[in-house]
Image (tube, grey):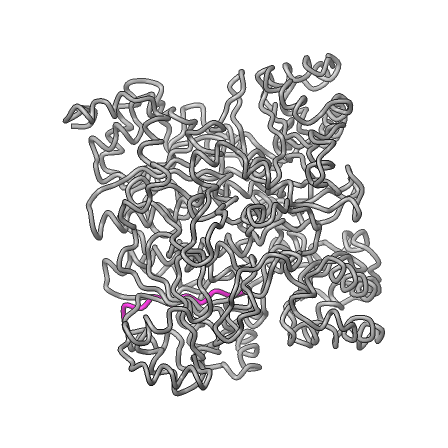
């Protein structure tokens, strides 16, 4: 283990020079040993149960066990997006045999790399061809083939594959497969047991279905986040940060709508397969779109509009439904604190009071803040978090976490990727 | 033979000839979901869950037709019932004994179609009742700290003896390992596992790590549990055996960061935030326009924030056209090649030029000019605009439900999780008060006499 050193951390800037192989084990922190974990279970008098979990659930044992979806055959055809790819990965990771089909020119996603940096692409051992990490990351357990469905011969080959398939994942443009005679309409004639799932951006039909530009460019994810109100509702309001400096609608860092659509597609596919195998013997057509799948899990935002015409505003690192439940800046980053029920709420306060006695007087003794529901009013959030941040600004992330953990509060710092791995 | 496709009837011939869009519309037939069968017919699922993450995993099954029994703390119910945005949206009542308390909208969307049972299962006298439920069910989702259900003799170790076909899910924050007892929430997952660190404006743009508007890691993880449950059901069809699923919510957040983890693992580069732009494509980001679309609106969300457009022109031809629309030949000359545009400083340059061009225009004007030129652009929509969008309305993914208990409720969820042509998802009711189905389940399903149920109720055991 690397040795301990005294360092002064005043901001994240100070932590950057600490990220070296000497200080932090890199590439990744080693997994904990069973002995270390045993001690943790011991603290809660659950050693026996912990041992049972150790014997049965340990990640390393996965490879000696059977796979739940073995026997299912999946074809995945599509370009550019992550939705159908994530669905295919999930099915592949659970044991289905997945064949990813690309045109002979390859999926353009292969060419993508952050800021165009080719040095962060991986080269094929034999051909030397470079491929972006994003693409590789989403190709888990998939076999790769090329097939040109533009040609008649390619279409025939695709049909021959589809006859034996349980699932086809379609990540192409609306109607593209159908026009070439290899969509659900045609394939279901030759394979009535086929479950065919389109994973689109906003849908393959309807007034705002997926578009392409005049020059053939596809619509890709942040469009889904922008057209289902996710982006509008995410970010800081202008009384916290000025416009153009974070006080704007904000997209997620990743193409999160695609991920959500992908997992939801996998759920729907397995449900359709269950119905096929258990009841009817028939396949069916499924459609999942990124914008809608993300809208499905957009809390209650649009239902709230239906309730009293509220249009959700941005609340930055705070949550309008719970108090406390937020992250706020501390000395070297951000600290997340959560605990809404009375039990947790007062425990958070007790923890803060140890260093900052005014917290008790200002927050716990405020009669308005004694009622769980009332604490969610905007002015209650502002008051609680202002006083909490007054405490946080004096300490750094590790200190805050340790202090809050003493009181068994669900709290944690925002970690960067290196700190996560 | 592969390739030979002959329609068998006149209807089928017409179906084969219809334009694809029309075919889809007919196949999915929004509004008539209830005339079709459900996928998960006959599956009965128990849910000892709270908040969003684990309830959503069971809710997902309930939308697909499983019979989900949600077991809540007597009289209090799920903690999520007591949450509502700024404390303003409630439906009444919560429970017989609490007529003045309502269920808040925080409870929405994760709990459709469930049956509501109340039971204090940690009371030893109720344990047999719980076991009787287990005997008649396919599985269970729980979210207690690890070892709690084991201490109560309700963990997989015990339940598999009672019902070997039982599928058991533990959904928690960290899973097996040194942090196993750590509690978790959605934002803890966002914060702790990388997602927050790549969301929001970069330091040099003046921004901070940004929380997703919704509990995205709760919902996203819940869906992944539903996926695990379905995979386990398929496995059980072959073997007749149940299984235990352990799910760590925090790890979902890491999985949703695209190339960030392999980039760090291979090269030691830590992915940072990049605001509303894209690290791999340019132009592919949201820009600020000078004028709001609704300067006279009363709601500040319309008045001040209807100013953003998502613009995408990362391919060379698109970028060329975009530059000609904003009349900046230099910009095109400077960044003709895709690879040059996506460089960090180039992105700053390009988006600055775009925002400068949009500085005297309204959001809809910018979107229209670009769309007319054949470039992809779309206004960043707020909740009202999504509600009013013809697209979602026609597809039935935003629609009103006449809830049997609460009347008209606007739905954004359930139907939008995906359309299935033969066994569609559906929403029958949004939720019911705490313990609303006690009689149905204790008396009709388990066969306990009414007097017994009344006794439990009086003692607040149910």
- Left or right? Give the position of A416 relative to B244: right
**Is A57 rendered above or below residue A291?**
below
Magenta stretch: includes residue B168: yes
Residue B310 drawn at (x, y percent): 63, 30
* Picture coordinates of residue A350, whole percent (x, y): 74, 77
Residue at the spot x=53%, y=70% of the render? Answer: B99
Q: Quadrant of residue B444?
A: bottom left
Give the camera-side residue of B320 and B131.
Answer: B131
Q: Residue at x 81, y 66 (%)?
A: A391
Where residue B221 appears, as percent x and y from the top left, is: 49, 55
Tally of marks:
0
Instruction: Kindly identify the residue that appears in the image at 21 percent across and 30 percent down.
Output: A189
Q: Can residue B151 be seen?
A: no
Image position of B76 with respect to B335: above or below: below
Give the residues in magenta: B163-174
Is A420 magenta? The answer is no
In the image, A98 versus A214, the foreground residue is: A214
Q: Quadrant of the N terminus of chain A?
A: bottom right
Q: Is residue A117 visible?
A: yes
Q: Is residue A356 left or right of residue A228?
A: right
Q: Is residue A189 above or below residue A6?
A: above
Q: Is residue B408 left or right of residue B319?
A: left
- Quadrant of the drawing holding the C terminus of chain A: bottom right
* Quarter holding residue B440: bottom left
Q: Position of residue A42 (x, y in %)?
A: 54, 82
């Amino acid at each position: 283990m690397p040795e301990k050193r005294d360092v002064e951390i005043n901001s994240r800037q100070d932590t950057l020079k600490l990220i070296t192989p000497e200080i932090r084990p890199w590439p990744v922190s080693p997994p904990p040993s069973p002995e270390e974990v045993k001690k943790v279970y011991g603290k809660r008098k659950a050693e026996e149960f912990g041992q049972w979990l150790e014997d049965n659930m340990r990640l390393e044992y996965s490879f000696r066990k059977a796979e739940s979806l073995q026997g299912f055959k999946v074809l995945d055809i599509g370009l550019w997006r992550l939705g159908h790819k994530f669905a295919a990965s999930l099915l592949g990771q659970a044991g289905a045999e997945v064949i990813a089909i690309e045109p002979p020119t390859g999926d353009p996603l292969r060419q993508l790399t952050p800021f165009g940096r080719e040095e962060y692409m991986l080269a094929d051992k034999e051909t030397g061809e470079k491929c972006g990490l994003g693409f590789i990351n989403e190709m888990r357990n998939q076999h790769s083939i090329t097939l040109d469905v533009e040609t008649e011969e390619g279409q025939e080959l695709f049909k021959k594959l589809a006859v034996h398939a349980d699932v086809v994942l379609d990540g192409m443009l609306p109607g593209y497969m159908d026009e070439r005679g290899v969509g659900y309409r045609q394939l279901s004639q030759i394979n009535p047991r086929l479950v065919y799932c389109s994973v689109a951006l906003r849908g393959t039909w309807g007034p705002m279905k997926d578009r392409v530009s005049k020059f053939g460019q596809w619509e890709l994810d942040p469009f889904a986040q922008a057209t289902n109100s996710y982006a509008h509702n995410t970010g800081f309001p202008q009384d916290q940060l000025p416009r153009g400096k974070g006080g704007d609608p904000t997209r997620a860092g990743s193409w999160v709508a695609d991920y959500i659509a992908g997992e939801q597609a996998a759920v729907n596919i397995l449900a359709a397969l269950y119905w096929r195998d258990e009841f009817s013997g028939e396949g069916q057509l499924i459609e999942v779109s990124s914008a809608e799948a993300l809208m499905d899990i957009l809390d209650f935002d649009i239902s709230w509009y239906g309730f009293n015409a509220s249009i959700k505003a941005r609340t930055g690192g705070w949550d309008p439904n719970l108090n406390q439940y937020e992250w706020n800046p501390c000395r070297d980053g951000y600290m997340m604190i959560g605990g809404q029920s009375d039990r947790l709420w007062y425990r958070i306060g007790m923890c803060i009071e140890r260093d900052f006695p005014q917290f008790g007087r200002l927050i716990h003794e405020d009669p308005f803040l004694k009622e769980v529901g009332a604490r969610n009013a905007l002015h209650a959030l502002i008051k609680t978090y202002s006083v909490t941040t007054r405490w946080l600004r004096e300490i750094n992330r590790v200190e805050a976490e340790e202090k809050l953990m003493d009181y068994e509060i669900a709290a944690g710092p925002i970690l960067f990727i290196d700190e996560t791995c | 033979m592969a390739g030979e496709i002959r329609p068998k009837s006149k209807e089928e011939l017409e179906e084969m000839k219809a334009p694809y869009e029309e075919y889809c519309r007919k196949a999915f037939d929004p509004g008539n979901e209830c005339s079709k069968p459900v996928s998960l017919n006959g599956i009965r699922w128990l849910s000892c869950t709270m908040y969003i993450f684990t309830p959503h995993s069971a809710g997902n099954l309930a939308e697909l037709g499983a019979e989900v029994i949600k077991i809540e703390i007597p009289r209090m119910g799920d903690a999520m019932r007591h949450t509502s945005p700024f404390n303003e949206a409630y439906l009444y009542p919560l429970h017989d004994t609490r007529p003045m308390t309502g269920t808040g909208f925080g409870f929405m969307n994760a709990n459709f179609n469930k049956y509501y049972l109340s039971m204090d299962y940690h009371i030893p006298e109720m344990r047999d009742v719980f076991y009787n439920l287990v005997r008649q069910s396919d599985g269970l989702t729980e979210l207690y700290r690890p070892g709690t259900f084991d201490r109560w003799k309700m963990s997989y170790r015990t339940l598999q003896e009672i019902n070997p076909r039982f599928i058991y899910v533990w959904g928690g924050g960290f899973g097996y390992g040194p942090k196993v007892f750590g509690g978790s929430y959605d934002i803890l997952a966002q914060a702790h596992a990388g997602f927050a660190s790549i969301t929001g404006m970069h330091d040099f743009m003046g921004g901070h790590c940004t929380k997703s508007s919704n509990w995205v890691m709760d919902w996203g993880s819940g869906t992944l549990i539903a996926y695990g449950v379905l995979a386990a059901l398929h496995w059980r069809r072959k073997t007749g055996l149940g299984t235990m699923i352990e799910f760590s919510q925090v790890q979902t957040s890491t999985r949703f960061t695209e190339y960030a983890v392999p980039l760090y693992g291979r090269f030691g580069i830590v992915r940072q935030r990049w605001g509303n732009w894209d690290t791999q494509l340019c132009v592919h980001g949201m820009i600020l326009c000078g004028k709001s679309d609704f300067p006279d609106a009363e709601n500040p969300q319309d008045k001040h924030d209807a100013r953003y457009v998502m613009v995408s022109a990362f391919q060379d031809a698109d970028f060329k056209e975009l530059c000609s629309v904003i009349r900046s030949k230099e910009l095109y000359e400077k960044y003709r090649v895709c690879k040059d545009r996506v460089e960090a400083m180039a992105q700053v340059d390009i988006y600055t030029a775009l925002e400068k061009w949009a500085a005297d225009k309204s959001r809809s004007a910018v979107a229209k000019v670009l769309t007319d030129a054949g470039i992809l652009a779309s206004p960043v929509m707020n909740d009202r605009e999504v509600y009013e969008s013809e697209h979602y309305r026609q597809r039935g993914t935003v629609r009103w439900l006449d809830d049997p208990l609460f009347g008209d409720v606007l739905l954004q969820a359930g139907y939008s999780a995906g359309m299935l042509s033969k066994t569609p998802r559906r929403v029958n009711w949004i939720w019911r008060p705490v313990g609303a189905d006690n009689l149905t389940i204790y008396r009709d399903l388990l066969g306990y006499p009414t007097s017994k149920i009344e006794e439990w109720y009086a003692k607040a055991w149910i």
